[in-house]
Image (spheres, rainbow, N blue to C red):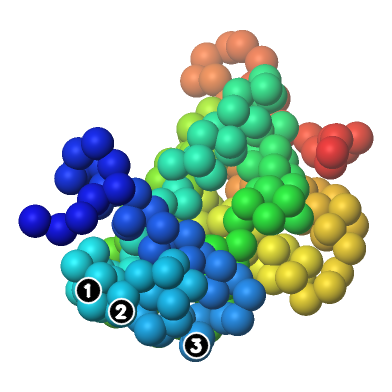
Amino acid sequence: MPRISAPTLREHRAAQRARLLDAARAILLERGPDALAFGAVADLAGLARPSVYEYFASRDHLLAALVEAELPAWLAEVRAELGRHATPLDRLGAFVRVQLEMFAAGKHRVGAALAGGAVRPGPELGRAVAATHGQVYALVQPALAELGVRDEPAVARLVAACVADAIRQVKGGAPSAAVARTAVAFVRGAVAACVPPRAAPARGGAAAGPRPSVRGARTR
């Protein structure tokens, strides 16, 4: 029976796993993905190297676990910010802005560290990233549906791609506030341009309004 440092074996294993994930996160953010070796993770966590294999079968498995561990808090914060805005274009702007604010506050750095081809994903990391993307798109699609955007999945992917590139710009040293203003304005304008004109009524009545306007839209 292994020596445990918690009331139950389950709690002990959860604590050890969290300790390893904390160490892996620190190495990834401070030294980059190439430094994320099991020996380095074990050393920083203060555990024997074989202990890492009790929790993670491979480096790819460890990276997938990092992505999955970061996701719930990230989703909750983005959802909370979207809930503060009434109109769909305001929610789309908030979707962009809050992620840049989170990155600037150090809350979005695992995804950024793994983005841009820095890591070639194996099967487990690929599945974790795909699942994350699916949940990201799901945050955007209600606003797109409310606007009447055609091909919501494609537009949602483009909005998410804009966020990813804006984060890369900030990571490269561009001023966060300026990048946020530009990205929010770009997303609002691009999405508004994807809203088809509403069809005129079949009989009599006046035609419905034009595409939503972004003139004077807030970018903060």
Indicate the secondary structure of the residue bearing disc 1: helix
Q: Residue furthest top?
A: 205
Distance CA(mark 3)–CA(mark 2): 18 Å
Q: Is residue 35 left or right of residue 53?
A: right
Q: Quadrant of the C terminus?
A: top right
Q: Earlier in the sequence, mark 1 or mark 3?
A: 3
Label 1 sits on what residue type? Tyr
Image vertical order of residue 126 relative to residue 88, above or below: below
Task: Name the residue tied to disc 3.
Answer: 34
Tag 2 residue: 49
Q: Is 36 placed above or below 92 here?
A: below
Circle 1 sits on which residue? 53
Q: Position of residue 140 (x, y in %)?
A: 52, 41
Q: Is residue 126 above or below residue 21?
A: below
Residue 91, numbered label: none
Q: Choose between 110 and 27: the one closer to the eye.
A: 27
The amino acid beneath tag 3 is Asp
Inspect the image, locate mark 2, and give the three-letter code of the amino acid beneath it: Arg
Dot 3 crowding, Cα within 10 Å, few <14, some 14–19, many 20+? few
